[in-house]
Amino acid sequence: MNKPIRVACAECTVRDLCLPPGLSSQEIEEVEAIVGTRRKIKRYQELFHAGDGFGSLYAIRVGSFKTRVTTQDGREQVTGFRMAGEILGLDGIGLQRHACDAVALEDSEVCVIPFEQLEELSREHTALQHHFHRVMSRELVNDQGLMLLLGNMRAEERLATFLLNMSERMRARGFSPNSFVLRMSRQEIGSYLGLKLETVSRAFSRFNEMGMVEVSQREIRLKDTGALRSMVEHCTGT
C-alpha cells in the first residue's frame, strides 16, 4: 500500500468544491486535522468494494472514478461517475457497509475523511454540516436524474443529457465546458445510460453528422450545445 500523504486543504485546487465557502483559517485547520492523509489510487484499482465496512468518506482531489454494482448474472452496472471535488463513500452511511465498488478511471488521489470525526466537527460548525447535507442531497438528485434517463428518454436524448452534465461539471472546475476528454469508455457510458455499446457509438456518430459534437476517440468538442439542450428540453417538456 502506498504511504499516506499529509493533506493541506488550504492549498488544494478543488477546495471550493469540497468545503463550504467562508470557513476561517482555524476552521480549515480543524478540517485538515481530521482529514489527515491522502491516498493515491492507480487506474483500474478499487478504492473500496461492495460489502466492505464503512468508516470514511473520500474527497477526490485528482482524477476520476466510476461506481458500479454487479448484477446477479455477473454483469457490471455502472451507477455513476465522480470527478475531482466530489465525494465517494456516501453509499455506506446507512448500513455501515459499502453498497458498490469505486474504481479509478485514471491515476487518482483522494483525501480520507473519517466519518465519525466529520460528524463531531460538523456539530460544532453548522456551515460544514449544511454543506455535507447539500452533498448528500446532490447525490439523491443525481440518482433521480438517472431514473429519468432510463425511463423516459431515447438513446440520443440520454447521451445528450450525459454530455451536457459533463460540460457543466467541467465548467464548475474552471475547465473548458466545450472541449474535454472522457475518462470512461463508451461501454461504461452505455452501462450507465442503459444502452448497448453499439447504440452509444451510433448516437455519437449521429451527433457528429448533425454538427453538434466533434469526436476524436475520447476527446469531445461540443459544437452546438444549444441543439443538445433543445433535444433534452423537448423530451422533458421544459
Image: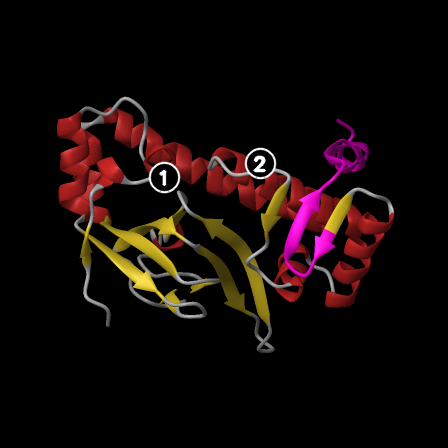
So how many labels did they put on this image? 2
- Local packing at callout 1 (Cα closer than 10 Å; few below 14, some 14-19, many 20+) is many
Q: Earlier in the sequence, mark 2 or mark 1?
A: 1
Q: Which residue is pictured at 79% across the width and 32% down the height?
A: 230
- Residue 4 lies, in percent from the top left, at 19, 61
102 versus 176 height, above or below: below
- Residue 73 lies, in percent from the top left, at 60, 78
Query: Disc 2 residue type?
Result: Glu
Q: Quadrant location of residue 127?
A: top left
Tag 2's secondary structure? helix
149 relative to 46 in the view: left or right: right
224 relative to 63 in the view: left or right: right
Magenta run includes residue 222: yes
Q: Which residue is mark 2?
A: 168
Q: Which residues are magenta?
A: 215-238
How many angstroms separate mark 2 from mark 1 (CA)?
15 Å
- Residue 169 lies, in percent from the top left, at 53, 39
Residue 230's disc is none
Q: Which residue is pictured at 16% across the width and 27% down the height?
A: 25
Tag 1's secondary structure? loop
Magenta run includes residue 83: no
Q: Which residue is pictured at 55% across the width and 42% down the height?
A: 142
Q: Which residue is mark 1?
A: 14
22 versus 208 height, above or below: above
